Image (spheres, rainbow, N blue to C red):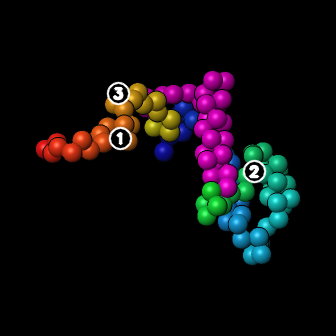
């Protein structure tokens, strides 16, 4: 497969299940050290407690946006790794109307 247009890949090392401290297999320091060696940020997350879950996605999104702005990643119609989608409709939660007591059928 051709990698044309792909100049940089954005990575984030994520330690998950941070809520299970008693069952920890990798220390925070080990995670930070590995991420530093690999040249990427590191976060510990927990979906159960919702700790750093949003931050993980925001960190990746900001890294991609910065790489796009710096020209390290190029938006190319032939490459489907990064696509810009123009939103023409409001999100689904805005499309749903509150019941008015009358049938909307």
Image quarter (top left, top right, bottom left or bottom right) of the C terminus: top left
In the image, the segment drawn in magenta is 51-79
View extreme (left): residue:
105
Q: Nearer the viewer, residue 26 or 79?
A: 26
Which residue is denoted by mark 2 in the rendering?
Answer: 42
Badge 3 is on which residue? 88
Instruction: Please check the rendered image and state whether residue 72 is part of the magenta-colored stretch, yes or no.
Output: yes
Identified at 62% across, 56% down, the residue is 50
Mark found first going from the N terminus, 1 or 2: 2
| Kind of element beneath mark 1 | helix
Label ID, residue 92: 1
**Residue that appears at 67% across and 65% down:** 17
Q: CA distance from mark 3 to mark 2?
A: 35 Å
The stretch drawn in magenta includes residue 29: no
57 to 94, vertically: above or below: below
Residue 94 drawn at (x, y percent): 36, 37
> Do residues under tags 1 and 2 come within 8 Å of each other at their CB atoms?
no
* Pair 1/3: label in front: 1
């Amino acid at each position: 497969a051709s990698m044309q247009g792909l100049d940089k890949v954005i990575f984030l090392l994520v330690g998950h299940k941070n809520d299970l401290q008693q069952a920890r297999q990798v220390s925070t320091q080990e995670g930070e050290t590995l991420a530093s060696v690999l040249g990427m940020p590191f976060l510990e997350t927990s979906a159960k407690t919702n700790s750093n879950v949003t931050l993980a996605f925001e960190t990746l999104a900001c890294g991609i946006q910065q790489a796009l702005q710096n020209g390290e990643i190029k938006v190319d119609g032939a490459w489907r790794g990064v696509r810009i989608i123009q939103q023409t409709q409001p999100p689904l939660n805005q499309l749903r109307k509150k019941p008015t007591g009358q049938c909307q059928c």
